[in-house]
Amino acid sequence: MLDTLKERPDAGDHVSRHLWPKTIAYLEVNNLFRYEIDRAMRASYTIRRDEAKIIVRVIEIFQDHKSYEKRFHY
């Protein structure tokens, strides 16, 4: 996953703002993406530009789809 995001930061699926969790980890982000690691595992991350660099910050990695569903409610 990390190698893919280094090459293509937008490789994940964009998450609409109305679907964002209402937890503190998600309050200060301007965009949100999810990345399917495998059939069950998911990760949420945000992309930020800092001068000439693109910074990808992984917010959470979900070990199974049940924990992802609990956080995102879908």
Image (cartoon, helix red, strand yellow):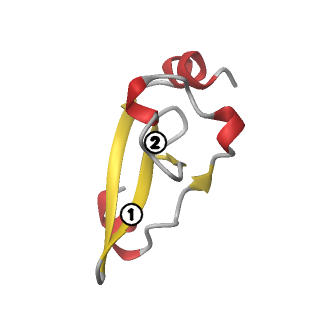
Residue lying at 44% horizontally and 41% vertically, measured from the top left:
43
Amino acid carrying label 1: it is Arg
Q: Nearer the viewer, residue 21 or 13?
A: 21
Tell me where residue 3 sits by quadrant: bottom left
Left or right: 73 in relation to 70: right
- Between 9 and 26, the one lying in front of the other is 26
Q: In this picture, is 40 found above or below 73? A: below
Q: Nearer the viewer, residue 59 or 4?
A: 59
Classify mark 1: helix, strand or loop: strand
Dot 2 falls on a residue whose secondary structure is strand
Quickly name the residue at label 2.
44
At 38% from the left and 31% from the top, the residue drawn is: 25
What is the quadrant of the C terminus in the image? top right
- For the residue carrying disc 1, how many other residues have a C-alpha within 10 Å: few (<14), some (14-19), or many (20+)? some
Q: Can you give x and y, in whole percent of width and height, for residue 2 in the image?
A: 31, 58
Q: Determine the image quadrant of residue 55.
A: bottom left
Which corner quadrant holds the N terminus? bottom left
Q: Is residue 46 above or below residue 6?
A: above
State the image coordinates of residue 10 (x, y, percent, origin top left). 51, 66
Question: Can you tell which mark lies on residue 48?
Answer: 1
- x 37%, y 34%: residue: 60
**Where does residue 56 sit, x and y in percent of width and height?**
34, 59
Q: Is residue 13 left or right of residue 29?
A: right
Q: Determine contact: label 1, label 2, CB under 8 Å.
A: no
Q: In this figure, what is the number of numbered marks?
A: 2
Task: Quote the CA–CA distance across marks 1 and 2.
Answer: 14 Å
Crowding at dot 2, Cα within 10 Å, few <14 / some 14-19 / many 20+, comes out as many
Tell which residue pokes out farthest to the bottom in this image.
52
Q: Residue at x 40, y 25 (%)?
A: 24
Q: Single out the mark in the foreground, 1 or 2.
A: 1
Q: Amino acid at mark 2?
A: Ser
Q: Position of residue 71 (x, y in %)?
A: 54, 21
